[in-house]
Image (cartoon, rainbow, N blue to C red):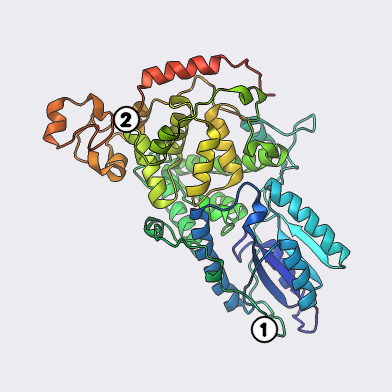
Amino acid sequence: MPSPSPSKAPAIVWFRQDLRIDDNPALSAAADSGAPVIPLFIWSPEEEGDWEPGGATRWWLHHSLSELAETLARLGSPLIVKRGYSLSVLRDFAKEVGAHAVFWNRRYEPAAIIRDKNIKGALVKDGIDARSFNASLLFEPWQVLNGKNEPYKVFTAYYKAATALVTPPAPIEKPKQLLAPAKKLGTVSISDLMLLPKINWTEGMKEAWKPGEGGAKENLEIFLSGVIDNYTSDRDRPSVVGTSRLSPHLHFGEISPRTIWHAVKEIDKSPQGREGKSTYLKEIVWREFAHHLLYHFPLTTKAPLRPEFERFAWRDDKQLLKLWQKGQTGYPLVDAGMRELWHTGWMHNRVRMVVASFLVKHLLLSWQEGSQWFWDTLVDADLANNTLGWQWSAGCGADAAPYFRIFNPVLQSEKFDPDGKYIRRWVPELAKLPKPWIHKPWEAPAEVLKAHGIVLGKDYPEPVVDHSFARNRALDAFKQLKAVPVK
């Protein structure tokens, strides 16, 4: 690293979804220049197009920014926080501080790509060195293409091509110190951004999560110290800690996929653990696939990738949608998942698939409604992952589940929550109900319900739809579409 020189014009590091110090290419490039470093965060939610941050995202952002600010202050240069349109703020601020460079890490959402391209062009015209870096992906979306130089639409083929392409580079070490600018700069406080809700509904999220780079490292350590050994089997069991719980940390850039990839690769475990490593790394590449698709097919945030689904006759039933959102469908596993989401801002991935399938195939409500609800309530509301997951569930996207795959919520519950532990936690009105009725209380004998003080329709709802009826209705509706194979 060159010797720092306070006489040099400063470099601005524009933080976005890269709220970390370790393996942060933009921050390291600024520090390596030997110039004063000015970390900057700009709050500009209106620039996100149709996808302004939801309430859960804003709560997480507040706490993650607070930790980042403390870390940067310890390194020597405090975080500057501004509000306004990014281009205007960057140009005005660069002029104010006499910056020679603005560095940032790339984002890949459609609105961000357009914005960043315009910003880079404007800054270059101003005579400023404007550079962006890859900090959030193992592979750039344009790196992995098929033999026809086209994007992949099937994960297996993408996975083989991506992992054969190049070994992800090792993480970059964090700067040991940052040289602060010569004068104190104006900033708004993080609390001034008003990211926290006026009505406190976040207690469950506080109990479940520790936003920030420190929390990301803790979750990675917990995962690698034992959870990964049984990942292949336990990842589908919502009642146990069987996953990494790193998804929100990845979304906010509190940890990089390179850090995770190399940390997983380096652990030496039993054959069972090695299977867990392989399975987990495949999930990391699935995240890459999601960003690959969003980059090449930006309209899929609202429109199906498979065009025949544009004419699918989704139902419009606001009451049913509300019952699904609030976990009042009468199907215990579905309701448990939706209540976990509301309370903690997160839902187990196996249960996400079940509740998504239930919305689009049991209720025939559109995947866009589900995608929007997840966006508003998830702390890991990532546009690429959210879009891919919902289009997969609806059968209208890349590598999509076939239309005839309709999850039976009872069988899913019996298989992946056999003792009903997950249901008992999130649907406490059924907590005392024994197996097998915990999975299907509407089939429980009257004397069993009475013995446990449960009146269906009063203490817990009757099913909003019969599974067999819903399955046949969905099959008929999906068969009406003229199949168009995904290339």
Number of numbered discs overlaid on the protein picture: 2
Residue bearing the label numbered 2: 414
Q: In which quarter of the image is the N terminus?
A: bottom right
Q: What residue type is disc 1 on?
A: Lys
Q: Is residue 288 above or below residue 439?
A: below
Residue drawn at (15%, 26%), measured in percent from left and top?
446
Look at the numbered disc 1 and give the secondary structure of its residue: loop
Q: Which dot marks residue 478? A: none
Location of residue 415 (image quadrant): top left
Nearest the camera: 7 or 305? 305
Q: What residue type is disc 2 on?
A: Glu
Left-right relation of 213 to 163: left
The answer to whether residue 2 of the structure is visible from this angle is no
Residue drawn at (59%, 37%), measured in percent from left and top?
388
Left-right relation of 117 to 66: right
Residue bearing the label numbered 1: 184
Location of residue 471 (image quadrant): top left
Residue drawn at (35%, 22%), measured in percent from left and top?
466
The crowd level at tag 2 (other Cα within 10 Å; few <14, some 14-19, many 20+) is some
- What percent of the width, then of the height, locates residue 429? 23, 41
Q: Which of disc 1 and disc 2 is earlier in sequence?
A: 1
The crowd level at tag 1 (other Cα within 10 Å; few <14, some 14-19, many 20+) is few
